[in-house]
Amino acid sequence: MIEVVTVDITTLDVSAVVNAANSTLLGGGGVDGAIHRAAGPRLQAHCGTLGGCPVGQARMTPGFGLRAPWIIHTVGPVWQGGSQGEADLLQACYTNSFELAVAKGLDSIAFPGISTGAYGYPVEQAAVLALETMQLYRFKVPRIVACCFSDRDARVYGKLLSGSTV
Ligand code: AR6
């Protein structure tokens, strides 16, 4: 099942929340800042032991004070116009996040719109990739949540899911 919701991702009752991090994994603004605030300082201390994360890859940590028991940190590409491999890198973020969840046997996962905030990836293009990858994993992870932070983004996802063009 793929759900589209418009909420603060830190409030969701899921097995894993995906964080749109930067390659230091030490926290930042946007959804990364919200997740670190909700998880508390033990998250940054733990992330500091991981040695960062390259763009397109993912790392799992406990959720600490977060409602979700696990956080999957992935580093999206900075949008540079689309000719620098951004689509492959963004797809790798989703795939590698799912692979960590599957390896751990998790039954629910929530994704923010990776790269679509500070990193500037156009939401319409990012949502196509996100939903394509979610469809591929929907039999491996029973509950998949596309967590939007604006009604506009939720409409983009909703239209794509219902099969109409954006
Ligand atoms: N819950 C759900 N979605 C959110 C929340 C939230 N609490 N807060 C923001 N969003 P961004 P990026 C949405 O900028 O583009 C950080 O500083 C937001 O509206 O958080 O991958 C990192 O440290 C947008 O749709 O991530 C990196 O330096 C989406 O989350 C950099 O930003 C992603 O926006 C990563 O940039």
Image (spheres, rainbow, N blue to C red):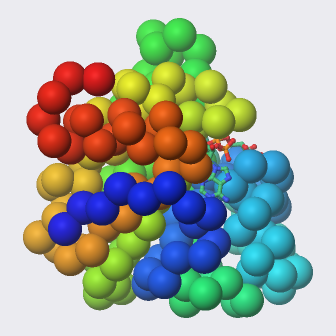
Residue 21 placement (x, y as % from top left): 67, 53
Q: Which residue is at the front of the view, 74 or 13?
A: 13
Q: Which residue is at the front of the view, 158 or 58?
A: 158
**Residue at left 21%, top 77%?**
142
**Residue at left 11%, top 70%?**
139
Residue 81 placement (x, y as % from top left): 53, 10
**Residue at left 55%, top 89%?**
69
Image side of residue 6 versus residue 20, left or right: left
Residue 62 placement (x, y as % from top left): 62, 86
**Residue at left 56%, top 35%?**
116
Looking at the figure, which quarter contains the C terminus?
A: top left
Q: Is residue 112 visible?
A: yes
Image side of residue 122 versus residue 118, left or right: left
Q: Can residue 97 be seen in this view?
A: no
Image side of residue 80 versus residue 86, left or right: right
Give the vertical position of 85 relative to 157 (above or below): above
